[in-house]
Image (cartoon, helix red, strand yellow):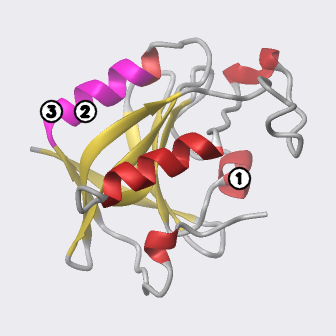
Amino acid sequence: MFTRSADLIGRRLNPPSTIRLDHRCLTLLHRSLLAVWPEEGCALLLGRFEGTASLRLETVWPACNRWGAGEADMPWIVARPAERDRNFLLDPREQLAAQRWARSRGQMRIGVAHSHPASNAEPSVADRQRAEPHQLMLILGNDREIQAWWLGEDRQVRPVLIDVQ
């Protein structure tokens, strides 16, 4: 059910303590996630590892929430559009396009961002079950604050400090 990004194969990944980003990325992240409010917004996070303890977010790739749309394209998911205020689904084709684009620029997918219009910025059980391990989760909560989390192989999340530069 879960696939690992080709960028991560063979890497030993320790949870980072910090995600570094600039104001441009933070602004784009807020705007893209809030654009579909009160539905969940989503985006891919592209960047690179900086040593063993931190990640650098270099590109926010806004994405469409495909939850409940185009079941013919994605028959493995049964979803209703009315549930978009509590769920999101990234199109696999969009993920591949983002990964190709990132690789051509020396970046990789480091995680996914999404919003929780009706709840706080903590990962839900569904978030932990659906997400790819060894990835960053940035979540914009209903208070419009962003929190960062690292999802481990054990499906447990660990908080990550956000450093805006």
Amino acid residing under circle 2: Leu
The answer to whether mark 1 and mark 3 are in CB contact below 8 A is no
The answer to whether 108 is drawn above or below residue 53 in the figure is above
Q: What is the number of the mark on residue 114?
A: none
Secondary structure of the residue carrying tag 2 is: helix
Q: Which residue is mark 1?
A: 130
Q: Position of residue 38 (x, y in %)?
A: 59, 12
Overall secondary structure of the magenta stretch?
Answer: helix
Q: Which mark is residue 26?
A: 2
Helix or strand or loop: what does disc 1 sit on?
helix
Q: Which span is picked out in magenta?
A: 22-32
User: Label 3 belongs to which residue?
Assistant: 23
Name the image quarter holding the C terminus: top left
- Which residue is at 51% across, 22% downward? 142
The answer to whether marks 2 and 1 mark residues whose Cβ atoms lie closer than 8 Å is no
Mark 1 nearby-residue class (10 Å; few <14, some 14–19, many ≥20): some
Residue 145, image quadrant? top left
Q: Is residue 150 visible?
A: yes
* Left or right of residue 122: residue 163: left
Residue lying at 41% horizontally and 54% vertically, measured from the top left: 100
Name the image quarter holding residue 31: top left
